[in-house]
Image (spheres, grey):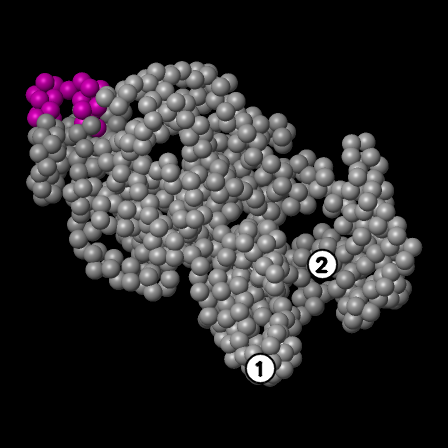
Amino acid sequence: MIHVPAPDPFTVFGLQRSMDVDERALEQRYLKLSRECHPDLHRQQETGDCIAVLQRAAEINDAWKVLRDPWQRAKSLLELASPGVLDREKKLDPAFLADALELAEEVAFANGATINPLRERLERAIADDLEALHGAIRSGEHALAARRLHASHYHRKAMRDLDAKS
Amino acid sequence: MTGTPTPAAPRLVVGIDLGTTNSLAAVRAGKGARVLRDQDGEPLVPSVVCFHPDGRTIVGRAGKALRLEHPDRTVFSIKRLIGRSVRDLGPDLNHLPYAVVAGERDLPRVRIGDAQWSPEAISALILQQVKHNAEQALGHPVREAVVTVPAWFDDAQRQATKDAAALAGLDCLRILNEPTAAALAYGIDGSKDGTALVYDLGGGTFDVSILRIDQGVFRVLATAGDTHLGGDDFDELLAQRIFALLPKTDDPYVLQAVRAAAEGLKIQLSTQERAELQLDLGARGQVTLAVTRAEFEGAIAPLVQRTLDCVQRAVKDAGLRLEQLDDVVLVGGSTRVPLVRARLQSLTHKVPHTGVDPDLAVALGAAIQADVLAGNDRSLLLLDVIPLSLGIETLGGTVQKLILRNTTIPTSVTEEFSTGVDNQTAVDLTVFQGERELAKDCRRLGHFKLRGIPPLPAGLPRIAVTFLVDADGVLRVNAREQRTGAEASIQIVPSFGLTRDEVRKMMLDSIEHAQADYLAREAIDLRVKAEAMVRGTQKALAMAELPPDQTYAVQKATKALAKLLVGNADAPTLKQACDDLSKLTATIADDVISSAVTKALREEGSK
């Protein structure tokens, strides 16, 4: 009896493995699956089934969490398409890292008038990251996509730090 | 209102709001739900237990009425103590007129004379009274319930509430978050999709939840709150002004009287611009005080601001902006305070809904979820979240979060662990709940010991530990060694609340004393009923224009009953006198008395 890992989120939702997801259709699918599998609506069943129902409901909730978030969706896709790629492609361009450090410093010292322009810059950087990430996954450049995903962490962290300040 | 259940009757599960100040039960009725009232037509059971010196345990309104007479034997706000340790409670215990001592494992025990009561046992007495009222109203036994708690309650507080229900003879099918329940009460038909903010300010706790309602699925997006912020704190600020005018004292009578006076002032200030107090405590002092609404609002403004900070955090956690809210719903008695409404409205730019009585909404919502869990309604589904992150302690005393707060439940996560020493066969894991980084700042939930790991060099065993949070928000842990497939057994030692053995023993004790308890409660019920009849009849007599002979006959029977009440008559005598009086008033009611008077009589509780 080896631990069985949970099925991937695309399988749980019965979806094609793709970055392109219709958000409203995804939400509808989530509600439908929840109705079918939530333990509250299946309380009359045997105890053995109960655990299975519970696990299935947990899988649906956990898959929904991944699928609705474009970053987590990309991460999951990358791991499925090319297992281990995120671990292998950790090394980022030193020039990028220098920029990222500078950005973190700017965030740390941001106040008053400098906050809004900085936020706009970060928003653009994050949108660019996401677009490049999608593009790389679509064209099958998994190594490139993995590096871009790692790079985006710096921008998203800077944004969180900035949000925490205001 | 007695109904005999037919064989085809659907399974009946009640919803119970076990509140800091008041408790009540409700049941599904048609498309909505209805509260279950006691024989006097009152839905609320004050969450107060008086341990009378004569040995009686008096719960609810009758108990609350004794709080000035027996301040050190009348327990209120027990919900603030449940599932917590004396160390957690700290200075909160100082203001209580009853004594709280530290029992085993630093658990609080209420000391009444020589006896010590756990918060679970006292909560069970309140639940028993609610159950009893529900059974009277429904005409048949109640065994299953959904019980509500503040969303911010941690695992130990939830477990303790479940234990209290078990002690009261109730099978608790679900511990439901209060703001979620309230949202169900508002959005029951599910026809109106949208995003709602539920602002629940009760006597002792504050909760805020953001929900999305979508085709009958109620999805909680985020919840936040403060376990220690409520109307009692407003009272406390007013009480401090009263105390300032009195000589310093810890006389329980004075503490209780001042508390009651402060609450009275607060209630007046919800409808008046100015309230006056004249408190005469005899030899203990006199107080004359006038408070304006502006002064009161100035004092509570920082507390109200704290609730608004929570609201903003919840909206952010839900990934929304304030403008994206469609509805704002008010729950809890303290939302009657005008400043609360005004500040919330100016923050959200939405006129808050007040369509359902804020005191009843939680129980009504619990009744709806109860019906879903009973299997009677499959049109609704509630998807709730865990309110606090779950994590395990790692080296150095930090907490590694495994499941983040506001994650929809059920949810699961699997983590891999290994050993640090050669041939190690057991690993200790301590689970914490909370948002802080260090274990010492989080709530220790329990301790898991994984045994049966095959003896291997350090770092080689691969132990997959799965943490599964079920639909109750309760954590289940399961562990397997990956290489050998050996299952590691897990022992759970709860850090707070009662151990399983204690619960079992208390349940056995309660069965042993069930007969005596039942008789005692019957006698109390009868007294309460008789008192209501005397009051009701006197009121009706004043309203009705009866022929003199009938007036005389009713007055005579009423006086006879009142005399028995003063003279501490036994139950059978009292019952006879009650029956005599109700026969008399019933005939008159048929003949002469207008429907208004019959209504007055019914309201006052005659059968």
Chain letter behind tag 2: A
**Closer mark to the observer between disc 2 and disc 1:** 1
Give the dominant element type of the magenta stretch: helix, strand or loop.
Answer: helix
Residue B587 seen anywhere in this rendered image of the structure: no
Marks 2 and 1: CB-CB under 8 Å? no
Residue B487 in the magenta stretch? The answer is: no
Q: Is residue B479 left or right of residue B570?
A: right
Q: Nearer the viewer, residue B153 or B223?
A: B153
Disc 1 crowd, CA 10 A, few/some/many (<14, 14-19, 20+): some
The three-letter amino acid code for the residue at tag 1 is Asn
Whole-percent x and y of residue A89? 84, 66
Q: Nearer the viewer, residue A40 or B300?
A: B300
Residue located beneath label 1 in the image:
B423
Chain letter behind tag 1: B
For residue A67, the mark is 2
Identify the residue at image location x=53%, y=76%: B426
Residue B538 in the magenta stretch? The answer is: yes
Q: Identify the magenta region.
A: B536-557
Name the element at disc 2.
Answer: helix
